[in-house]
Structures are given as structure tokens and as C-alpha cells.
Amino acid sequence: MKSINSIIIFVVLVTLGQSIKAQDYAVALKTPAVYNHYTLNPFLINPAHTGFEKINRIVFNFRNHWAGFEGSPKGLTLGINGSPAENMGLGGIIYSENFGVANRFTGQVNYAYNFKATETTKMSLGLSGSYIQYSLDNEAITDGLHQASDGIINAAVNGENFFGADLGFWADFSDKFRIGITLPQLVLSRLDNKKSDENKPFNFIGFLGVKWNVPSYRMSIEPSVCVRKISDVPFGTDLNVVANMLDDRLFAGFTYSFGPSDSRVSFLGGVRVEQFRFYYSYDQSYQSFQSFNNGSHELTLSFDLGKGKQMSKPKMNNGEESIGDVKN
């Protein structure tokens, strides 16, 4: 009974009430991973930010969505990104999520070209390629209520494999304004002989942040807004504020998210000790479903491995800098 309940909840939530066809199953499942801490680790949602900070970093993230609810989504992420060569960002992400008896696994490689447009403007173009697998546990077909003729469930137990590609752009102006654009799943193609969904929805994530430094208090404050259009879900918006205090040793943040399908608030706190950074956030939804769970928790632990190669301005054919001299 537990597995059937999980399947029912899973199907209802990922399809938002739409009827499921075999080709809809994978597309409905394939939505980018949800993170609250993307303002602190943008490369998790935008491949163009890979290596942008010129720090080689390992990131571990855990998110427990709807804590206290049986079969609630739980996601684990292991990411690494850095700058192994001048103007290059390179990284990888391994993501695993289970939702009741449903599972998703993603292995992703990021590449970015980072460069200085001017002395005060840094830009980057990024591309990622992913292997994605969706599957259901065997428990989904061993439950007494399962119908042997249910082809959708039977096929899902064997797993469905996809290749995905994301495209991103990131820019930093005068270390004050940050702009990011991501096109998640610009390519999503099945790795078998079955036909992919021809009506794949358009996905979009846009980010804009403004940073204010307050030297007298050894802190900076960055309000930001993030808008996203994912799968068939209407546009959602995050309003964020993150404060870095004591020369980036303490962090505090607040997010208010709203849209036709969700409304929630999130509180974030963090600390940096030498090369280690630890962040924790808690978010509470304002939906009737909230009465059945204890909110969502997210933890991030990162470790800085050292500085990467610095970026420079693109060179002209004669080998000269295109705009002025470069200072690393």
C-alpha cells in the first residue's frame, strides 16, 4: 500500500493534475533540481558560472523536501567546479533524488568560457551535458494493488535514460551587478529507440542581483530576483536578500517565493571557517499541503581547494589584447 500511495502522490504532483501518457512520464519527471542555496553556488543552476569565481571548490548539498511526510523527495548533490586553465571553467555534478518509489539520477559535466570584456566587466558562456535516468523501485510492481497490464509503471521500473544539455550566460559588472540566464534542458533526448516528446516545454531561469558593500561594518548585502519557467509550471519568482558579514565569515539570507503553484518563505544561515563553508536553510510553504509536513530543510557543505587560473580579455588575431592591458 505504501508504494501505491507514493506512486499516486508522485504522479499527481509531477503532472499537476494532467493525464499521463507513456511519453509524458519522463518529461514530467525531468525538471531541474530544486536548490535554495543557488545564490551562493550559482553553478548548480547555471553552467556559465562554472569556474567564474576562480576558486576550485567541492560542494555537497542535501535537501529534504516536505520533511515528516512519508515518501517525501530527498535530493543529494555532489559538485565540483574550478578553473584549470585561463578563461576556462570546468566542473561536474552528480545528483540523486528519490521520491517515494520514484528515483532520478543525473551525471552532468559543465564547461564555461570566462573572459573579461573590460577591466570591470566579466562574462561567461557555459554549456552542460547530462546523462539522466528515471526509474521506479521494484516495490512499485510487487504491491498487491499493482495491475500487471500497467505498461507505464512496468516501463518505468526498467528505467528511462536521457541525454540533456543546458546553456547559460553569466556576467558581473564592477563587482556590483550580477546577471545570469539559463536555458535548462534545451536538449532532452531519449537514449533508446523510443520517440521523445515532441511537445517539450520551454525552460528558462533568469537571475539579477545587486551587491552593496558596507566596509565600515565589514559586510555586503545583495538583494536579487530569480524568475523561472520550468516544464508546464507557470512562472515562479524568488525575491532574495543575502548578507555576508565579518569579511565573508558569516552569512544570513531570506527568500520569498511566489507563483501560481507555490508560495513560501525561506531563512538561511551560514559560516565560513578557513576553506570550509556550511549553509543551512529552512523553508515553509503557504499551501494547504503544508499542514501535512514540517517544511523543507537544505544543507550545503563546501571546501575550497585553492585558486584557479585567472581570466583575461579575448585576444585579437595579432595576439594583442582586444581592450587595454590585463591585470590578473
Image: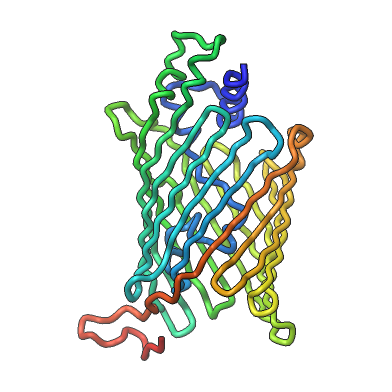
Vertical placement of 320 versus 37: above or below? below
Q: At 69% from the left edge and 73% from the top edge, which residue is drawn? A: 221
Q: Position of residue 60 (x, y in %)?
A: 52, 55
Q: Is residue 4 left or right of residue 106?
A: right
> Residue 219 lies in what quarter of the image?
bottom right
Q: Report the side of 313 relative to 283 (left or right).
A: left
Residue 76 position within the rendered picture, expressed as x and y whole percent measured from the top left = 53, 46
What residue is drawn where x is 51% and y is 30%? 102
Q: Is residue 253 left or right of residue 199?
A: right
Q: Which of the pair 318/101 is nearer the observer?
A: 101
Check the image and tell me how it is coloured: rainbow
- Position of residue 91 relative to residue 236, above or below, is below
Q: Is residue 267 left or right of residue 27?
A: right
Q: Determine the image quadrant of residue 54.
A: bottom left
Residue depicted at x 40% and y 21%: 155
Of the 4 image quadrants, the one containing the C terminus is: bottom left
The quadrant of the picture occupied by the N terminus is: top right
Residue 189 location (% of width, % of height): 34, 37
Q: Looking at the image, which is closer to me, 229 or 103?
A: 103
**How many numbered discs sit on the rendered protein?**
0
Residue that appears at 44% across and 33% down: 134
Q: Is residue 311 above or below residue 157?
A: below
Q: Position of residue 309 (x, y in %)?
A: 37, 77
